[in-house]
Amino acid sequence: MKICKSISELIKLRRSGGLGDIGFVPTMGALHSGHGSLIQRSVEENDSTVLSIYVNPTQFDNADDLANYPDKNQADHTLAESLGVDIVLMPTYEQLYPDLYRYFVDEKEFSHVLCGAHREGHFTGVLTVVMKLLNIVRPARAYFGDKDQQQLKLIEGMVAAFFLDSQVIGCATVREQDGLALSSRNLNLTAEQRRQAPNFYKALMTSLDDDEVAAILSQEGFKVDYIQTINSRRYGAAFLGPVRLIDNVELNAGLNVGLNNDVQRKVAQ
Ligand code: PAF
């Protein structure tokens, strides 16, 4: 496995033609089995797999969250190698943002609801870095987890809107046995918060309406950003201490609560 710390080195390797069809798994590191499932699928479906590890500052609206984002480089490399990754791309800010973020990709509708309504500029940062990475790697296929479903849909929309020549593949959320969706941020939960955290998923899955779910979570000590059901899918974000958990679950048909037609239309696109 090759570790590429420079974008130009990666581009040189790609242009040499030896990588064939590239599968791409963009990450911010602190890899867990959710990332592992994306990597495995990429290794199965492509001639070579590129994994990027880059904690992208432009998508953080909170300096503490950025500073506390877990860093597990050595363990990440060991896992990536064991799963068959060919190249790990680890660019620097200076390489990725030669324009100092003067240019960016902005989406005007769906990026402003759900997480976008609570994290100023978050999806602009995500879309911009993913656009840059897709242009650098030029993968046949790029893999993203369904836990961040809003991110996945926005990236699908961007790839279509800009005629990018990569297929976006969404992969199912991987959960702990107790239902908690895997996330790098789970590493920052205390033992007590880790014990409480699955209640977030369990509350999302109930047949209560969104406001009732939010009320129950608040009683249990979560600080709820939003609980919102759109087209039978319930999305939620809530803090446990400093850790922000997000998740989404499919509800039974007929459980569409508190829907706004405009938002439904955007999600359905
Ligand atoms: O999902 C993530 O880890 C990040 O948002 C991504 C897609 C790697 C962009 O920085």
Image (tube, rainbow, N blue to C red):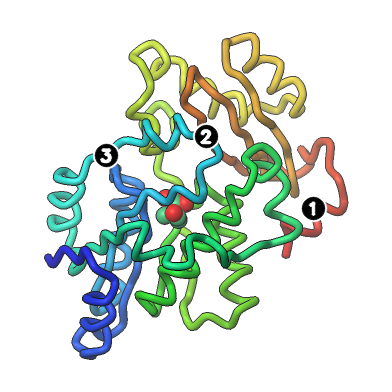
* Amino acid type, callout 1: Gln
Closer mark to the observer between disc 3 and disc 1: 3
Q: Residues within 10 Å of mark 1 (few under 14, many from 20)?
A: some
Q: Is residue 264 left or right of residue 126?
A: right
- Residue to which mark 2 is pinned: 62
Identify whether 212 is placed above or below 57: above
Identify the mark nearer the N-term, 3 or 2: 2
Mark nearest the camera among 2 and 1 is 2
Tell me which residue sits at (84%, 42%) in the image: 259
Question: Where residue 249 sits in the image (x, y, percent)?
Answer: 59, 40
Looking at the picture, how far across and down is residue 120, in whole percent?
Answer: 64, 43
CA gap, disc 3 to disc 1? 37 Å
Residue 200, above or below 92: above
Q: Amino acid at mark 2?
A: Asn
Q: Residue at x 46, y 15 (%)?
A: 196
Picture residue at 31% right of the left edge, 58% below the top: 92
Q: CA distance from mark 2 to mark 1?
A: 29 Å
Q: Quadrant of the C terminus?
A: bottom right
Is the CB atom of the residue marked by disc 3 within 8 angstroms of ligand 1's nearest atom? no
Image quadrant of residue 143? Answer: bottom left
In the picture of the structure, the residue carrying the numbered disc 1 is 264
Asked whether the beta carbons under mark 3 and mark 2 sit within 8 Å of each other, the answer is no
Residue 190, located in which quarter of the rendered image? top left
Residue placed most toward the observer, 104 or 26:
104
Could you classify mark 3 by the number of other residues whose Cα lies within 10 Å: few (under 14), some (14-19), or many (20 or more)?
A: some
The quarter of the image holding the N terminus is bottom left
Residue at the (13%, 55%) spot, across then down? 82
Residue 71 is tagged as 3
